[in-house]
Image (cartoon, helix red, strand yellow):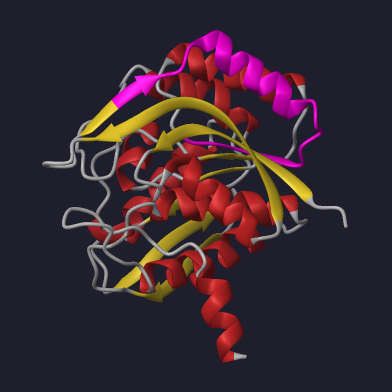
Amino acid sequence: MSMKKALTIAGSDTSGGAGMQADLKTFQEHQVYGMVALTTIVTMDPNNWSHSVHPIPLSTLEAQLATAFSTEIDAVKTGMLGSVEIIELAAKAIKNYKLNKVVIDPVMVCKGEAEVLHPETVDAMRDLLLPQATIVTPNLIEARHLAQVAPLRTIEDMQEAAKKIYDFGVQNVVIKGGTRLQHERAIDLFYDGKDFTILDAEKIDTNYNHGAGCTFAAAITANLANGQTAKEAAENAKTFVHAAIRHAFPLNSLVGPVMHGAYNIFHTENE
């Protein structure tokens, strides 16, 4: 049996809900063989779950990229990159290996943190990664910074931001509405440069949503690797992550991750 292969260039979430852990779990749920080029290790203070970031040396990342790309991967996803130098290295590798299934998840904040981790990376993402992207998957905060607009509160705000982000050279944009969007439904917006598509689902009242963004982008990556169009990949990823949020659970008293296997477990049971 031959499996499609996907690489995530991302950070490690020690708690296992987001980052490369979420990516690998999601790839596996889509029958895609996952690989990692690790950029950063993120740890959490057990007392308040504040984050600490521990970068991986650039030379080590470069060696990881050479290892992974030598296997002729089918799709690549970026997550937490953390510095201009890391973005430059990732962008160079993606370009050199001529990948045409590229998902850029422009991670700028850790869940629970309000400030952009490294503001100087926004320009580098915009200039170096977006022109190579099949699809970019910002949340409302990330979309605001990429598009250089006021905070996004409505679907109309999302549409205007999506147009601006598209103009940086990305092929498709999907903005994740999340809990900050003023809407009674769970809304994400897909834009292909011509048409807007609303990705709509029931809003789930839960604080257990750690890793939802990473999981959504990883599901898109796996779907692209398996031959779906960008729109199909986003629509099916929405269904997958919605199930993961519905069946999320408490890890401890401070955080609750999504359940990456929920769609395959419960969808199969309901058939």
Side of 121 relative to 125 (left or right): left
Residue lying at the far top in this picture: please name it: 59
Q: Nearer the viewer, residue 135 or 261?
A: 261
Q: Measured along the vertical axis of the image, is residue 26 above or below residue 87?
A: below
- Where's residue 9, x and y in %? 56, 31
Range of residues picked out in magenta: 53-79
- Where's residue 154, x and y in %? 28, 58
Residue lying at the far left in this picture: please name it: 47
Residue lying at the far right in this picture: please name it: 1
Is residue 159 visible in the rendered image? The answer is no
The part of the image, by quadrant, that contains residue 108 is top left
Q: Measured along the vertical axis of the image, is residue 117 above or below residue 209?
A: above
Side of 237 relative to 43 (left or right): right
Q: Quadrant of the C terminus?
A: bottom right
Side of 263 relative to 42 (left or right): right
Side of 181 relative to 103 (left or right): left
Is residue 178 visible in the rendered image? The answer is yes
Query: Image point 37% across, 39% down: which residue?
Result: 14
The part of the image, by quadrant, that contains residue 70 is top right
Q: Quadrant of the N terminus?
A: bottom right
- Asked whether 161 falls inside the magenta stretch, the response is no
Q: Nearer the viewer, residue 260 or 180?
A: 260
Query: Image point 78% across, 27% down: which residue?
Result: 98
- Where's residue 76, x and y in %? 65, 38
- Where's residue 2, x and y in %? 86, 53
Q: Measured along the vertical axis of the image, is residue 255 above or below residue 247?
A: above
